[in-house]
Amino acid sequence: MTRQGKVIIIVSGVVICSAIIMLSIWLLVNKPYISQLPPLPDLKALPVALQEQLSTASMKAHRNPTSDNLGMLGMVYHSSAYYEKAAQCYQLAIRKNKSAWKWNFYLGYLNREMGESKAALENFNTAIQKNPRVYHAWYYAGEEFQNQGDNKQAEIAFGKIADRQIQRSTVNSMSRTDYFPLPTYARFQLARIYLDTKRIEMAEKTLQEIVLNNRSFGPAYRLMGNIYSMKGDTLQSNRYTVRANDLAVYAPPVDTLIDRLSLLSRSELYLLKRIRIALRYLPME
């Protein structure tokens, strides 16, 4: 065998060994994630568009289980109303990249949808620790504290965003319209807490500030009407109540991250659920 032939054999052997080592490392790192991916549901009973979406996302996650691919599979399951499978994928995505806040946020919202308040708070708080500028996580955490009757912690959470200058979401005509910035909603929730904890003057002051800067924010007028009714000022109470009736009823703040689930969805079951939620906030004829 010539010297050149020996060199070729040695180089080929090194390349093959390197490839085997790299494949072994890849399998060692990724096999635990691949093995824990949820199996696909029975696709035959699903619409073709949803079959393709689930199959494609699952295949991508199996072939390359990065945090983003695992999390995206979770979003596909989430937007298809496969909540347990979505939670599994979100948890795997969090494990894969512990510094990524987005999957804690989506998992927290899923927990919230399922009525798992404690788990929702844990995930929202984790998202906040990773990125304190996730203001919607502060807002949802405040709502969960309110649901638990913990007004003190709710006040802290809403206070984190109430006085910030947060621009309204950039929402195109194919999505919802964002009429009010998130701090307006946070201040309104603070006013409710002040009222619930008998700090009437603080509640009134906060609501006056809201209507001064957001003249079409109907819920603030309605709550002001309640405050004046409690004070026995019927004239002012009626004035604010009439004004509230002329304006839109309360609607949650626009969250473009959560809107992505609806835009991603190919599931009638999930979309009908989102439509029912939206209908709650339409004004009554």
Image (spheres, grey):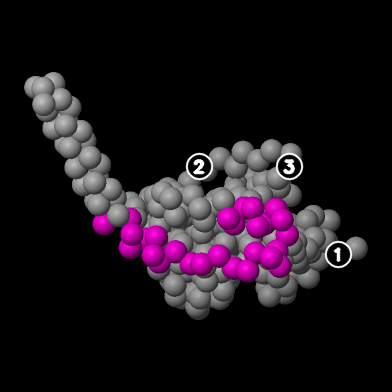
Return the residue nearer the eye: 129 or 56: 56
Along the polypeptide, which appears first: circle 3 or circle 2? 2
Along the polypeptide, which appears first: circle 2 or circle 1? 2
Question: Which residue position is annotated with label 1?
Answer: 284
- Crowding at label 3, few (<14), some or many (≥20) Cα neighbours within 10 Å? few
Along the polypeptide, which appears first: circle 3 or circle 1? 3
- Crowding at label 1, few (<14), some or many (≥20) Cα neighbours within 10 Å? few
Question: Which residue position is annotated with label 3?
Answer: 174
Range drawn in magenta: 28-55
The quadrant of the rendering that contains the N terminus is top left
Residue at (52% x, 71% y) in the render: 84
Q: Main secondary structure of the magenta part?
A: helix
Residue at (67% x, 46% y) in the render: 178
How many marks the image carries: the answer is 3
- Does residue 196 lie above or below 16 as drawn? below
Question: Which residue position is annotated with label 2?
Answer: 165
